[in-house]
Image: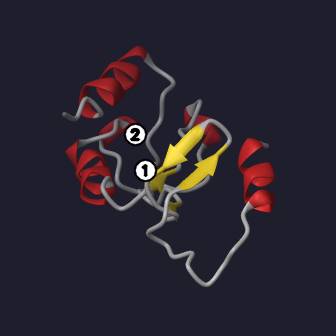
Amino acid sequence: MIWLTALREISLTSTTTLFTPLRLGTIELLNRIIMAPLTRMRAGAENIPTALNVEYYAQRASAGFIISEGTAISPQAQGYPSPPGIYTLVVYQEFFDESDVD
């Protein structure tokens, strides 16, 4: 748990803000904004990620570090409706086609 170790080493001072850089192990972040993934229920038919998933992350990409969202590994492994999945070749190909953002 590199991030947990790094967070323990952070000393907060009066000059530390959300917009100061942060090192998490070998990762150098431009700021201290860390976002959880929240694109739930945005996948399309057969749980294939769509342009809506891409738009969600593109809108937030400059904010800070975004933790990747989990994907269903089978149709039976879904905890809520319409999660992006990665359990068929079609889903796998669509996932990477949609996530190819410049």
What scheme was used to colour the molecule? secondary structure
Q: Is residue 43 above or below residue 99?
A: below
- To which quarter of the image does residue 50 belong? top left
- What amino acid does circle 1 point to? Ser
Residue at x 22% of width, y 35% of height: 101
Q: Which residue is mark 2?
A: 47
Residue 82 disc label: 1
Residue farthest bottom in this picture: 14
Q: Local crowd at mark 2 within 10 Å, few (<14), some, or many (≥20)?
A: many
- What amino acid does circle 2 point to? Asn
Is residue 89 at all visible to an observer of this figure? Answer: yes
6 to the left or right of 43: right
Residue at x 79% of width, y 43% of height: 1
Residue 41 spot, x, y in % from top left:
41, 57
Residue 89 spot, x, y in % from top left:
41, 15
Q: Local crowd at mark 1 within 10 Å, few (<14), some, or many (≥20)?
A: some
- Residues 17 and 95: in front is 17
- Residues 44 and 37: in front is 37
Is residue 69 at all visible to an observer of this figure? Answer: no
Tell me if label 2 and label 1 are in contact, CB under 8 Å: yes
Quick one: SS at disc 1?
A: loop
Residue 22 spot, x, y in % from top left:
56, 56
- Residues 19 and 14: in front is 14
Residue 36 spot, x, y in % from top left:
53, 60
Quick one: SS at disc 2?
A: helix
